[in-house]
Amino acid sequence: MKQFLKPSTQLSPLPAVIITACDKEGNSNLMTAAWTGIVNSTPPLCYVSIRPERFTYHMVKETMQFAINLTTTAIARATDLVGVIGGLKEDKWAKSGLTPTKASIVSCPLVEESPISLECVVREIMPLGSHDMFLAEIVAVAVNEEIINKETGRWELDSTSLLSYSHGEYFSQGDYLGHFGFSVKKKKD
Ligand SMILES: Cc1cc2nc3c(=O)[nH]c(=O)nc-3n(C[C@H](O)[C@H](O)[C@H](O)COP(=O)(O)O)c2cc1C
């Protein structure tokens, strides 16, 4: 039996990422975001929805650039922290202990402790109501060398448990269940 509730944003799990951004003077900030995702493969397009009252919002609007930094259990506390305090009053880099590192194309920094960062250039801003959606092109991907297997070149993301966010709670990555297409793969005799 199902209970039918009023409409709300009950999609889950979502990633809990850290958005990094900077202004034209080079001052940078970081904030947590769960309203983010991929919307197209070629060209690689993504979005992040940010409330206009966030300090980060004005930086993204000013430079039309940002980065999406994936998060792990190792930085779970810092991920939550940069999502509950405001960069207008606090130096969130110092407070969180996260380290800014240079990106390859965008001017804002990436989070050194993040295993994968997506450098993004905004293509369109869509005011939707509570949030503005920044539709952006992923112009570069930065991967921490520690997660790349030197022999196979494979990204070993299982070595760095990625965070997800479900109904207000954070979770680490669960058990490995199979790879893309495993449901139709024929078993070898
Ligand atoms: C798990 C989590 C997810 C969040 N997702 C979003 C989001 O998608 N969009 C948004 O505008 N704020 C989101 N927030 C809130 C901002 O991260 C928070 O208001 C932050 O303090 C803004 O920082 P700033 O004012 O320095 O930009 C989220 C917070 C948390 C903890």
Image (tube, helix red, strand yellow):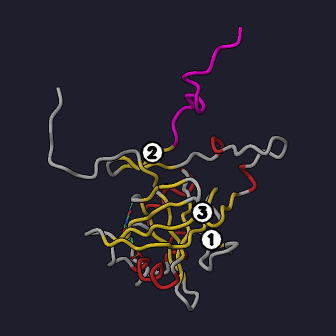
Q: Which residue does the numbered mark 2 point to in the structure image? A: 171
Q: Secondary structure at mark 3?
A: strand
Circle 3 packing at 10 Å, graded few (<14), some (14-19), many (20+), is: many
Q: Kindly report the distance in space between the C-alpha atoms of the residues bearing marks 2 and 3.
A: 22 Å
State which image quarter holds ligand 1.
bottom left
> What's the mark number on residue 99?
1
* Residue topped by disc 3: 118
Q: Position of residue 172 (x, y in %)?
A: 50, 44
Identity of the amino acid at label 2? Phe
Q: Are marks 2 and 3 in contact (CB under 8 Å)?
A: no
* Separation of residues labelled 2 and 1 (CA atoms): 23 Å
- Examine the residues drawn in magenta and state their main secondary structure: loop
Provide the residue span drawn in magenta: 173-189
Q: Residue at x 64, y 56 (%)?
A: 115
Viewed as shown, does residue 188 lie left or right of 110?
A: right
Amino acid at circle 3 = Leu
**Residue at the front extreme of this rendering:** 42
Residue 81 location in percent, x, y? Answer: 44, 66
Front residue of 70/104: it is 104
Toward which corner of the image does residue 152 lie, by quadrant?
top right
Residue 15 coordinates in the image, percent (x, y): 46, 52
Please state which of the two labelled residues, at mark 2 or mark 3, is closer to the viewer.
Answer: 3
Tell me: residue 83, above or below residue 64.
above
Q: Amino acid at mark 1?
A: Thr
Identified at 60% across, 31% down, the residue is: 179
3D distance between C-alphas at marks 3 and 1: 16 Å
